[in-house]
Image (cartoon, coloured by chain):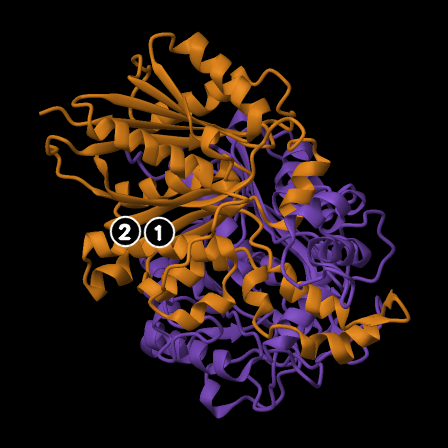
Chain colours: A orange, B purple
Amino acid sequence: MIRVVIAHHAARGPYLADAAPPDEPLANPRARKMMSRAAYLAALALADVMRALGLSADERARAGYFLGVGGSAGSLEDVGALLDASIIDGAFSLPAFGDRGLPACNPLLAFQLMNNFTMCHGAILEGLGGPNGALFSRGAGTVAAIAEAAHAVATGECELAIAGGADVATHPVTLAELARDGFLARGLVPADGAGLIALRAGAAAGAAGDVVLEGAAHASGRGRPLDDALDDALDDALADALARAGRGSIAEPDVVVLAPWGPPAADALRSYAAARFPGARTSDTGTRGDALAASPALAVIDAARVLQATPGGRALVLALGVDGDPGAVLLAQEAA
Amino acid sequence: MTPPARRSVYVRGVGAFTPLAPTWSATVAQLADGACAIREITAFDATGFPCRHAAAIDRELPDEDRRMPYARAAAREAWMQARLAVASARLGVFVGAESGRGRWATVLGLARAARGAPGAPGASGAFDHARFAREARPWADRIDASVLSPSAVAVALAHEVGAHGPVETVSLACASGSAAIVEAARAIRLGEIDAALCGGVGADVDPLMLAGFGLLGILSPRGVSCPFDAHRDGFVVGEGAAMLVLSAERGDAVVELAGIGRSLDAHRLTAPDPEGSGAARAMSAALADAGLAAVDYVQAHGTSTPLNDRIEVAAIRRVLGAAADRARVSSSKGALGHWVAGAGALGALYAYHAIAAGEILPTANLRTPDPLCDVPHVIGRAVRADVHAALASSFAFGGANSCLVLRRCG
């Protein structure tokens, strides 16, 4: 049994649409112009984690980085400049796009558009060189990134792995998607955020107070919408997480932290948690704002904070993404 | 966490939808003869673009989002070949993909709703939430995230093959397809699932992505993709899908996926580490994972950009040492262009074909090898060779690297 412990964690957000955006310096200030907002938030959180861990350059070069990423999306100021210069007689013209649009555009637009850059910007700034993955996440997919980081540590692929998620629900295109699909009308509160945890192998006999990530799993939603009964899919995710923890069943956790994709998913998760774990305290990360792909990571951080003050405590994070896909993360604090 | 005993991973089926043909089996015959799919772009007016050529699929396709028909066709071919019987809960789907595209009018409408038209009263150029709330709705109604998101492809394929296991989407730019195969192999090895449909799809012969790549100055102005050639001057975008079916059960498989390796360059956004250390670490990790020190064939990332090809060859030499003189090298991108999110999966099919058919496909358009890219290239036509093991490499913008080692089953 390899113990995977949370060595540190850091969060940015969730920031609501009308909140002042963070304006913090980066190791390389010029990098900001090339970043999507999601990449910027992830880079800030990563810098926090790296500062706290105090790793050498060699240790950083071996460290893994697994991130659940949403659509990173370029700034509409840049996309708009590209398109505005491409209008002839009031209509969009592809030849004008080639002739005049491209010179009018931020030449680094591509770095904002590609989803992997949400991860790569921070990795470059902090010198991370180990195994990696940018897993596209419409909510719960971020649990897959956390699970993979845990496996990379447990199997010895790397000694330390950073895992989490970053997303920007307040981007205009994402807002448009959320409006079209009815989530804004149903009460989803768009927010931006990034959450990262640092995982590393703990000693076989753990130190008291360590928060251990026992198991994590992301399962298929089987193509069903959020309004369907999804308890069986949540059971799948929980069973997979238990199997990875080397356990056949789950004791009542002290706390269940929910990471839903808006209110419909929150209702499903609350109902599931109440039925399965009636004695557990339940909290919902989404009540502070729905940061989409960042939410499961922010929920794991919430759970870790609770466990740090709960000797011998156990926590369960349940996530439910927009595709009806569930995720489960099992955490425990080593008793003294 | 409990790391389970590692299981073997077998390649049970392969399929592709390419600019040369709608199946991998039909594509291979043309590739072996040195065919090249790169043509002048006809799907849209590319006047003024930095590159006016691409390896595009120009058949009439029913879906507006081209990723879907490409991926479905490739998956169908691979799935039919695999003839698998697997419980739905033990079958996963792992796809490397980037976003689909909304229509131009939609993107423009959203941009204007957010920041106003140039010169319009009150238009400051900055994002105006109040204006957006008032004006975006007609455009928002046209953005269907369930269709355009990167994950839409994997979700659709899972539905087609009845997979109830993990459904994951990897968005790792040029390494996406390879990294998706890594994810699938990892899940099978660890016993999370018994079989997986995996691969990648690219559909970037598209004005926005051509603009993005063009702005970076990495496209070939001549529109010629000639990896490792002395006259190479950039890459040419291609499109298509490549899929594999992997299984823990050997069945009649002749090839196994024996090694996986990943790394980050942690150097610069556009350029790889000049020493190629990130690429070398991923190659070495994949070889070590397979328990091998050498391979008979390297399916190189080989983008046809001046810097990358030279660095990649240096990394190959550093990793393989003297064995590099005996390992044949080729790149898919001369014939089929750069599929971006699909490229790594296409590379895996080249490696699979070399082992399964004993035939190494050539680097199309390579005529005058660059002396700084001195490895045993496959030029002109395919060569027959007894290939026991092959390495397929993918190196992405941003420095994410993913390598696969395929090996003949013992």
Which amino acid, by three-letter code, is at mark 1?
Ala
Q: Residue at x 36, y 75 (%)?
A: B323
Q: Chain of mark 2?
A: A
Q: Quadrant of the N terminus of chain B?
A: top left
Tell me: residue A235, above or below residue B346.
above
**Numbered disc 1: secondary structure:** helix
Find disc 1 in the rendering and name its residue.
A45
Q: Residue at x 51, y 60 (%)?
A: B175
The span from disc 2 to disc 1 (Cα, nearest Å) is 6 Å
Q: Is residue B274 visible?
A: yes
Residue B173 appears in which quarter of the rendering?
Answer: bottom right
Category of crowding for the residue at label 2, using alpha-carbon neighbours closer than 10 angstroms: few (below 14), some (14–19), many (at least 20): many
Q: Chain of mark 1?
A: A
Find the residue positioned furthest to the front.
B121
Which amino acid, by three-letter code, is at mark 2?
Val
Q: Is residue A260 left or right of residue B59?
A: left
Find disc 2 in the rendering and name its residue.
A49
Q: Is residue B1 visible?
A: no
Tell me: residue B326, above or below residue B82.
below
Q: Nearer the viewer, residue B135 or B308?
A: B135
Q: Nearer the viewer, residue A1 or B148?
A: B148
